[in-house]
């Protein structure tokens, strides 16, 4: 019975999201969106992602609902302001099974370090939806990369070992040169630089014994990405 209810919710969410245009897709467009689920079938894996979720909530100051996405052969992740759970009013984040598999296969350290940083990128979009940055197009994407970079520092020091260069390489590889496409996320170098500058800001402030607030990170990110 519980499974049926969850399946119904997932199908309802899928039906709702396919008609919802606003949001960030890591790859492609809304026509690629597959079915969603709360459970991977591996309780240990779900527990790891739940831990990550709460650390993301703490650092980004937003509480979106989180689902896995059946992303087939198009590795994907997605953030939308659409509310799928009335108790989580900050929208919804989806992370694809195929994306997770791809990042783990490419992870030379075996830590799949890029996955939490991709999740951080999606959470940064939720911050943008909630508080508003005034940015558009690729600048919204580079903003999310910068904030993901800040998160990468905090995660690596306070939460879990993170292979920073591995995550940065993954973002570099996700850059594109489709300058006229609404899906343009920034070039490989722009994505790499935004991620690493966010990381460096958090690192430098920490070395000076200063606290980088969410507002401080948002302001620095907006200022930085406008140069591109
Ligand atoms: Zn994005």
Image (cartoon, grey):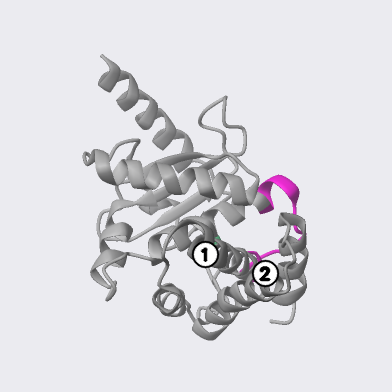
Visible residue check, residue 67: yes
Residue closest to the far bottom: 189
* Mark 1 or mark 2: whose residue is earlier in sequence: 1
* Quadrant in which the C terminus is drawn: bottom right
Side of 179 where 43 appears, left or right: left
Q: Residue at x 41, y 65 (%)?
A: 161
Residue 131 inside the magenta-drawn segment: yes
Residue 117 position in % (x across, y down) = 47, 62
For the residue carrying disc 1, how many other residues have a C-alpha within 10 Å: few (<14), some (14-19), or many (20+)? few
Q: Secondary structure at mark 1?
A: helix
Q: Which mark is on residue 157?
A: 1
Ligand 1 location (quadrant): bottom right
* Quadrant in which the N terminus is drawn: top left
Q: Residue at x 51, y 78 (%)?
A: 178
Residue 55 inside the magenta-drawn segment: no
Number of labelled discs?
A: 2
Residue 210 position in % (x across, y down) = 75, 66
Visible residue check, residue 80: no
| Occupied quadrant, residue 7 | top left
Side of 104 where 206 appears, left or right: right
| Residue segment shown in magenta | 128-140
Residue 198 position in % (x across, y down) = 63, 72
Side of 9 where 56 appears, left or right: right
Residue 30 position in % (x across, y down) = 44, 51
- Reply above or below: 3 against 59: above
Separation of disc 1 and disc 2 at Cα?
10 Å
- Residue identifier under label 2: 206
Q: Are marks 1 and 2 in contact (CB under 8 Å)?
A: yes
Q: Which of the two residues, 59 or 37, is positioned nearer the viewer here?
A: 59
Q: Which of the two residues, 209 or 141, is positioned nearer the viewer here?
A: 209
């Amino acid at each position: 019975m519980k499974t049926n209810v969850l399946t119904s919710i997932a199908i309802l969410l899928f039906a709702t999201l396919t008609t919802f245009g606003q949001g960030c897709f890591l790859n492609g467009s809304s026509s690629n969106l597959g079915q969603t689920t709360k459970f991977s079938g591996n309780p240990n894996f779900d527990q790891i992602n739940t831990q990550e979720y709460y650390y993301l909530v703490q650092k980004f100051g937003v509480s979106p609902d989180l689902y896995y996405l059946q992303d087939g052969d198009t590795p994907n992740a997605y953030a939308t302001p659409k509310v799928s759970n009335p108790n989580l009013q900050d929208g919804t984040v989806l992370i694809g099974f195929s994306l997770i598999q791809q990042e783990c296969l490419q992870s030379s350290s075996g830590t799949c370090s890029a996955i939490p940083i991709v999740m951080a990128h999606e959470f940064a979009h939720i911050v943008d939806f909630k508080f508003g940055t005034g940015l558009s197009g690729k600048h919204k994407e580079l903003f999310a990369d910068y904030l993901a970079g800040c998160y990468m520092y905090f995660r690596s020091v306070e939460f879990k070992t993170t292979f920073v260069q591995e995550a940065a390489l993954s973002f570099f590889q996700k850059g594109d040169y489709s300058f006229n496409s609404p899906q343009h996320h920034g070039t490989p170098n722009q994505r790499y630089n935004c991620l690493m500058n966010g990381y460096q800001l958090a690192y430098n402030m920490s070395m000076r014994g200063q606290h980088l607030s969410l507002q401080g990170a948002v302001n620095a990110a907006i200022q930085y990405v406008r140069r591109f």
